[in-house]
Amino acid sequence: MGTDELKTIGFIRQWINHSVLCHVAERTNARSLWRKLEAMYEPKNAENLAYMTRRLVNPKFKEAYSVAEYFIDIRSLELGHFRDEAR
């Protein structure tokens, strides 16, 4: 294993929460580490994407939900980011 591989693994691990680290600590190469993280988080992201798409296609405006917030949600959907209050 090269030094670049070790640096990559170290870089990824430094940003992982301790509660997640126990699930990926045994990974010895960057590719398998990344794939494990994808497997852990991808289903939730797909679920969020489906939720946001439904929400934006069929908006149910409330008095507290402004047009500006609607466009912010559209933009965040384009960027792949979801606001915490989406759920």
Image (cartoon, rainbow, N blue to C red):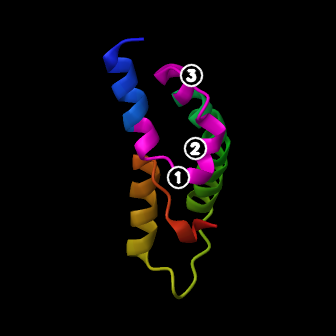
Q: Is residue 13 magenta?
A: yes
Answer with mark 3 or mark 1, whichever residue precedes in sequence: 1
Which residue is identified by label 3? Answer: 32
Labelled pair 2, 1 in contact (Cβ < 8 Å): yes
Image quarter where the C terminus lies is bottom right
Which residue is identified by label 1? Answer: 17
Question: Which residue is painted at 61% across and 61% down in the image?
Answer: 55
The local secondary structure at tag 2 comes to helix
Mark 3 nearby-residue class (10 Å; few <14, some 14–19, many ≥20): some
Q: Quadrant of residue 40?
A: top right
Question: Which residue is painted at 45% across and 53% down in the image?
Answer: 81
Amino acid at pointer 3: Ser
Question: Which residue is painted at 52% across and 29% down in the image?
Answer: 34
Q: Is residue 20 magenta?
A: yes
Seen in the image, is 53 located left or right of residue 77? right
Seen in the image, is 7 located left or right of residue 62? left
Q: Position of residue 45 (x, y in %)?
A: 59, 46
Amino acid at pointer 1: Asn
Q: Position of residue 25 (x, y in %)?
A: 59, 35
Q: Main secondary structure of the magenta part?
A: helix
Mark 2 nearby-residue class (10 Å; few <14, some 14–19, many ≥20): some
Viewer-proximal residue among 43 and 2: 2
Q: Is residue 76 visible?
A: yes
Q: Specify the segment rendered in magenta.
A: 12-33
Q: Position of residue 10 (x, y in %)?
A: 40, 34
Q: Is residue 45 visible?
A: no
The local secondary structure at tag 3 comes to helix
Which residue is identified by label 2? Answer: 21
- Is residue 69 placed above or below 22 in the rendered structure? below
Mark 1 nearby-residue class (10 Å; few <14, some 14–19, many ≥20): few
